[in-house]
Amino acid sequence: MNIRNLISAAILILGSLSAAAQSDRPGDIAKSIILGLEYEINAGINIGGASPLPLPAEIREINSYSPHLNLSIGTTVTKWFDDNGGKWGIASGFRFETKGMETDATVKNYGMTIIQDGKEMTGKWTGRVRTKYHTQQLSIPITAVYRINNRWKVNFGPYLAYAFSNEFDGHVYDGYLREGDPTGNKVSFEGDARATYDFGDELRKFQWGVQAGGSWRVFNRLSVNADLTWGLNDIFNKSFKTVTFHMYPIYLNMGFSYVF
C-alpha cells in the first residue's frame, strides 16, 4: 500500500465518519455491543520521528525537522469483560500506517558510510547531515481498555509492527570525514560539495513497543482518539554498527473512529 492509497482510503473513511456523525440524533442508535464486542474503523495521522534517547554527544544541534504527512487506517475490536458493557476490556486490531520524518543536524564524530563518485568511505563525520526516514508498516496493538464513563475510555499495552517498506537515506555536506576513526585521513566537503548515504537495508522489519492513549465519544458512533506509540527496540538491525547509538520510533497518532 503506497502513500496515495493511504490518502485515498483516509479521505473516504473521514468522509463517511462526517456524514454519519451529522445524521446521528440522541437515542437514534443503540450501543453496538454484541456478546461484549465493540467494532471500530480508525483513521488518523502520526506525528513524531525516530530519535536516540538521550540525545548523544555526537549530535550537537538539530537545525530543522519535518514530520511529513504520515497517515494511518485500520480497525479495532474491543472485548468487554461484562457483556452489557463493563468498565474493563481488551482490544486488538491492525493499522496500516506510514511513519517518517526529515531532519537536518550538526554533528561531530558521527558514524557514517558515504558514497562519493561511486566510492564508499566509512569513518567519523563532522559537519551537517540531512536525513530522510520513511517506513510503511502493519501494526497490531494489544491493549487493556478502561471505560471511565459513557464518553471516555483509555488504553495501554504493547504493539507489534512489520515494515514492508523502509527508507533511511540522505546526504552530508559542509564538513569533513575522518576515514576509519577520528584520527584517520581527512576528506573535506565544502561549498556545494556533498556525499550521499543509504542505510535503508539496515532497518529492522519487525518492531515492538508500547501504546497508551484515550478516546472521547463525540456522537453515538463517532470518537476522537489520541495514542502515543513508543518503540522499544532500535530501528536498525543489531548487526549494523555504523550508527553507534540506538534510535527509537516515537509517534503521536491523532484521529477519528467510527463505532459499529
Image (tube, grey):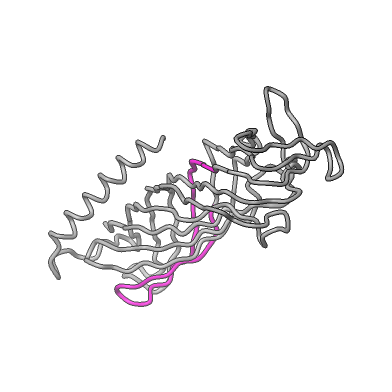
Q: Residue furthest bottom?
A: 149
Quadrant that contains the N terminus: top left
Predominant secondary structure in magenta? strand
Camera-side residue: 30 or 129?
129
- Relative side of 180 to 158, left or right: right
In magenta segment, residue 258: no
Name which quarter of the figure residue 54 lies in.
bottom right
Q: Residue furthest top?
A: 118
| 148 in magenta | yes
User: Which residue corresponds to the image point at 14% horizontal and 70% vertical from the top-left?
Assistant: 26
**Is residue 152 placed above or below 112 in the rendered structure?**
below
The structure residue drawn at horizontal position 25% and vertical position 67%, both measured from the top left corner, is 218
Q: As displayed, is residue 190 above or below residue 224? A: above
Q: Position of residue 111 (x, y in %)?
A: 74, 44
- Name the image quarter holding the C terminus: bottom left
Q: Which residues are magenta?
A: 133-159
Q: Nearer the viewer, residue 172 or 253?
A: 172
Instruction: Please tell me which residue lies in front, 70 or 212.
Output: 70
The x, y position of residue 184, in whole percent, is 86, 39
Q: Is residue 202 left or right of residue 227?
A: right
Q: Which residue is painted at 42% across and 70% down in the image?
A: 154
Q: Does residue 126 appear to the left or right of 183 in the view shown?
A: left
Q: Is residue 225 above or below residue 236?
A: below
Q: Please provide percent x and percent y for residue 16.
A: 21, 50
Question: In the rendered view, would you say 120 is above or below 37?
Answer: above
- In the figure, residue 132 lies in which quadrant? top right
